Image (cartoon, rainbow, N blue to C red):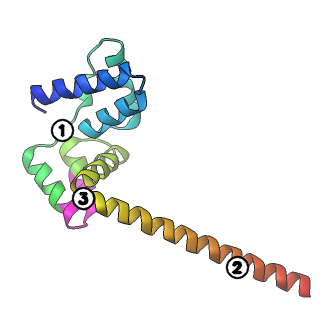
Amino acid sequence: MDPASLQKLLDDIKAEIAAGNMITAIKLYRDATGVGLAEAKQAVELIAAGKPPPSGAAPSLAADAMQEVSALITAGRKIEAIKVYRKAVGVDLKDAKDAVDALEAKINPAAVVTRDAAMRRRLVVTGLLVVAALAALVFLLTRG
């Protein structure tokens, strides 16, 4: 991240902190750095206290790795994108998944909305099947 972008990020985070929006400040930090929730919370708390965030808390991808991860996300190969991100940045699986999810939301927000809607439909269908199975079981038990 170049110095101007870093300064803008810090200014945005400080503005959110001043407005009492710690969750938004943490989200800004996570989206910009790709770190996990705990690391982002710690960094934002340091910023709120007037201290700089940990220098190692802002892993970033090299340009070629970023292009590869972006291409994999665009091609629908998210698991491979997470693997490439993990290897390039050296973070754990959850942090890599969170970073790739954030990048995916920036690259193709419609895909994220579509995937979430599909998941909700599957949950509704599963719920209906469970209710139907329970109703059939109750019917069989009361009949016999």
**Number of other residues with Cα within 10 Å of mark 1, as a class: few under 14, some 14 to 19, many 20 or more:** some
In this rendered view, identify the residue nearer to me: 49 or 83: 49
- Identify the disc placed on residue 108: 3
Mark 1 or 3: in front is: 3
In this rendered view, identify the residue nearer to me: 122 or 57: 122
Residue 86 to residue 35: above or below: below
**Number of other residues with Cα within 10 Å of mark 2, as a class: few under 14, some 14 to 19, many 20 or more:** few
Residue plotted at (41% across, 27% down): 22
Amino acid type assigned to the residue bearing label 3 in the image: Asn
Name the residue tied to disc 1: 60
Amino acid type assigned to the residue bearing label 1 in the image: Ser
Location of residue 20 in the rendering, given as x and y in whole percent from the top left corner: 42, 23
Q: Which residues are magenta?
A: 72-84
Task: State left or right for residue 127 relative to residue 47.
Answer: right
Amino acid type assigned to the residue bearing label 2 in the image: Ala
Instruction: State which quarter of the image contains the C terminus.
Output: bottom right
Mark 2 or 1: in front is: 2
Q: Which numbered disc, 2 or 1, marks the residue that appears first in the sequence?
A: 1
Q: Which numbered disc, 3 or 2, marks the residue that appears first in the sequence?
A: 3
Location of residue 78 in the rendering, given as x and y in whole percent from the top left corner: 28, 61
Location of residue 42 in the rendering, given as x and y in whole percent from the top left corner: 38, 24
Task: State left or right for residue 20 relative to residue 78.
Answer: right
Mark 3 → mark 2, Cα distance in angstroms: 37 Å
Q: Which numbered disc, 1 or 3, marks the residue that appears first in the sequence?
A: 1
Mark 2 → mark 1, Cα distance in angstroms: 49 Å
- Identify the disc placed on residue 132: 2
Residue plotted at (14% across, 30% down): 5
Which residue lies most toward the top here? Answer: 50
Location of residue 131 in the rendering, given as x and y in whole percent from the top left corner: 70, 74
Which residue lies most toward the front here? Answer: 19
